[in-house]
């Protein structure tokens, strides 16, 4: 008879998607509020600036989900910590580059281009740096979550092993007790 240990609420796809959608939506709402306070409502650019936070959230969800799938398929979580961190760091930089290129392309399709190359480079470096910071933070949280979940699973396995050992000891004691009990009952009847 083994004890049924239920899975923790922090496991599974549902939690992953809640964190993905909730985190990127919160960031999009924050960026939207900043855009609303930074641009007067009567300018043409303000309407287009409201689209950017929504697109950034969508790009973030898609990009980090692709990174998640890549980590899972390549089984990076089973690697030693140093190898894992290097791979995830490089993948985050590559993903930040891709997301910034997609963001730049979508911005230039709906907005007027910057007035100078210096202005475009400065804006590009700022958004690239932002993507790098966001993806490093996402990767850190992702890896911390998996480390936490792995430790929980390890503790659960240890508890199950301990429970099985105790059950084995109990069965052994019962096996020793039953013959003595029967022998004592028969002696009591015989006397």
Image: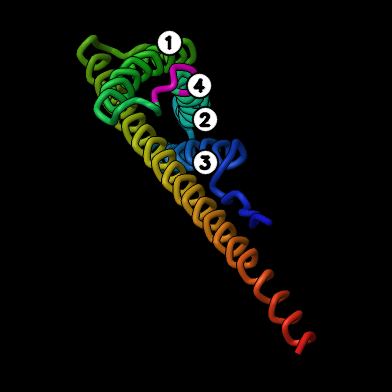
Instruction: Give the labeled residue for mark 4.
Output: 69
| Span of residues in magenta | 72-76
Going from the N terminus, do you reach mark 3 or mark 1 first? 3
Q: To which quarter of the image does residue 112 belong?
A: top left
- In this view, 24 is above or below 183: above
Taking the magenta stretch, the answer to whether it contains residue 75 is yes
Q: Principal SS element in the magenta part?
A: helix
Find residue 22 and report its horizontal and vertical position in percent.
Answer: 53, 42
Find residue 152 and report its horizontal and vertical position in percent.
Answer: 46, 49
Q: Nearer the viewer, mark 1 or mark 4?
A: 4
Find residue 72 and report its horizontal and vertical position in percent.
Answer: 48, 23
Element class at badge 3 = helix
Instruction: Give the labeled residue for mark 3.
Output: 19
> Residue shown at 31%/31% (left/top)?
136
Element class at badge 4 = helix
- In this view, 24 is above or below 182: above
How far is disc 4 from disc 3 in space, using C-alphas? 15 Å
- In this view, 183 is above or below 43: below
């Amino acid at each position: 008879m083994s004890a049924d240990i239920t899975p923790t609420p922090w496991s599974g796809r549902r939690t992953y998607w809640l964190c993905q959608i909730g985190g990127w939506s919160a960031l999009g709402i924050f960026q939207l509020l900043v855009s609303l306070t930074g641009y007067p409502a009567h300018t043409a650019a303000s309407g287009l600036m409201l689209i950017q936070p929504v697109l950034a959230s969508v790009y973030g969800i898609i990009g980090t989900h692709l990174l998640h799938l890549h980590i899972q398929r390549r089984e990076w979580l089973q690697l030693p910590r140093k190898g894992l961190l290097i791979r995830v760091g490089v993948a985050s930089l590559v993903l930040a580059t891709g997301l910034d290129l997609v963001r730049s392309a979508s911005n230039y399709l709906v907005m007027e281009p910057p007035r100078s190359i210096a202005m475009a480079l400065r804006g590009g470096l700022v958004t690239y740096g932002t993507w790098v910071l966001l993806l490093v933070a996402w990767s850190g949280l992702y890896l911390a979550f998996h480390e936490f979940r792995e430790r929980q699973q390890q503790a659960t396995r240890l508890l199950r092993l301990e429970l099985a050992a105790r059950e084995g000891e109990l069965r052994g004691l019962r096996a020793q007790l039953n013959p003595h009990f029967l022998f004592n009952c028969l002696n009591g009847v015989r006397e």
